[in-house]
Image: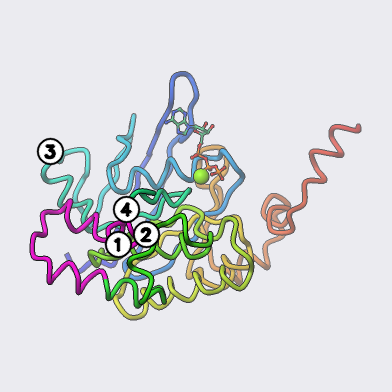
Amino acid sequence: MGSDVFIEVKGLKQQFGEHQVLRGVDAVIRRAETVVLLGASGGGKSVLIKHFNGLLKPVAGSVKVEGIELNCLGERELNVSRRKIGMMFQNGALFDSFTVFENIAFPLREMGEKDEAVIEQKVQEALDIVQLSNHGQKMPSELSGGMRKRVALARAVVHRPECVLYDEPHAGLDPITADQIDHLMKDLQAKWKITNVVITHEIRSAFRIADRILFLKEGLLYWEGSVTELKASKDPILSDFIAGNSSRSWESRSA
Ligand SMILES: Nc1ncnc2c1ncn2[C@@H]1O[C@H](COP(=O)(O)OP(=O)(O)OP(=O)(O)O)[C@@H](O)[C@H]1O
Ligand SMILES: [Mg+2]
């Protein structure tokens, strides 16, 4: 141990039927860094991160968490590894019939925590972090979209994972609320040394939070580097993506 590598992916391939989604991804996520995953819709970003906590099993290649190959683990050992990694799903996925408190308590109960005082204290701490201290008894339907995202974030971190995977935490948020989410993610990184893996289409946020950017294209890691390097890149694929520029496809269509 002692390595600063938290997740290591080698030659990762995934396909659904005939559709090859990941075609041999090599990537490393380091401990306590914020990595932002960029790339066009459908490029395999969500599929990639679902391998990090064993929700998907590779067709080929390997995924190691803290040096341990997930493919070699049985269900029980995999659960131990999963506890190190929290996940905020693309659509938030709150249970609508549970209060905010019970939504956040859910992972703790699922992991076998029985002590109500411990649950109460951890849920309250998570609520405080996302600045929803007095909203525990509300139902999800009473919350705004931004508040629901923050509840989803609290649920992803309530058990103090070492790493959190965020699938589009900014989607549907106004710039100010997106900014709050960015601050929360960076606070968690600073306070609890959490490793953040963030998929986002918000370039502004990506630039603000990323220690490193991985750019996925057509099932492969196309580019990686810092924000400064990305901004300076002359690669038209990268600069068009940043600018939200689809002129290439229009040019080729009208040609
Ligand atoms: N469970 C599944 N079964 C079949 N196909 C799937 C499954 N999950 C993902 N796919 C396909 O894999 C491809 C990549 O999907 P993925 O969700 O990883 O894209 P993405 O890069 O996250 O896109 P977006 O930015 O739109 O969220 C898509 O073509 C999708 O239809
Ligand atoms: Mg996705």
Residue furthest bottom in the image: 191
Tell me if mark 2 has few (under 14), some (14-19) or many (20+) residues whose alpha carbon lies within 10 angstroms of its own.
many
- In the rendered image, the quadrant that contains the C terminus is top right
Q: CA distance from mark 3 to mark 1?
A: 23 Å
SS type, badge 4: loop
Question: Magenta includes 249?
Answer: no
Question: Image height check: is 42 above or below 143?
Answer: above
Helix, strand or loop at label 1? It is strand
Residue type at the position of mark 2:
Ile
Magenta highlight range: 99-123
Question: Mark number for residue 74?
Answer: 3
User: Which mark, by number, is residue 5?
Assistant: 1
First in sequence, mark 4 or 2: give its number.
2
The residue singled out by tag 4 in the image is 98
**What residue appears at the point 67 percent right and 54 percent down from the top-left corner?**
238
Q: CA distance from mark 1 to mark 2?
A: 6 Å
Label 3 SS: loop
Q: Which residue is mark 2?
A: 29
The residue shown at (38%, 39%) is: 11
Residue name at image x 22 percent, y 43 percent? 70
Q: Earlier in the sequence, mark 2 or mark 3?
A: 2
Q: Between residues 194 and 132, which one lies in front from this camera angle?
A: 132
Callout 1: 10 Å neighbours few (<14), some, many (20+)?
some
The quadrant holding residue 54 is: top left
Q: Earlier in the sequence, mark 4 or mark 3?
A: 3
Q: Nearer the viewer, mark 4 or mark 1?
A: 4
Q: Amino acid at mark 4?
A: Phe
User: Which mark's residue is nearer the viewer, 4 or 3?
Assistant: 4
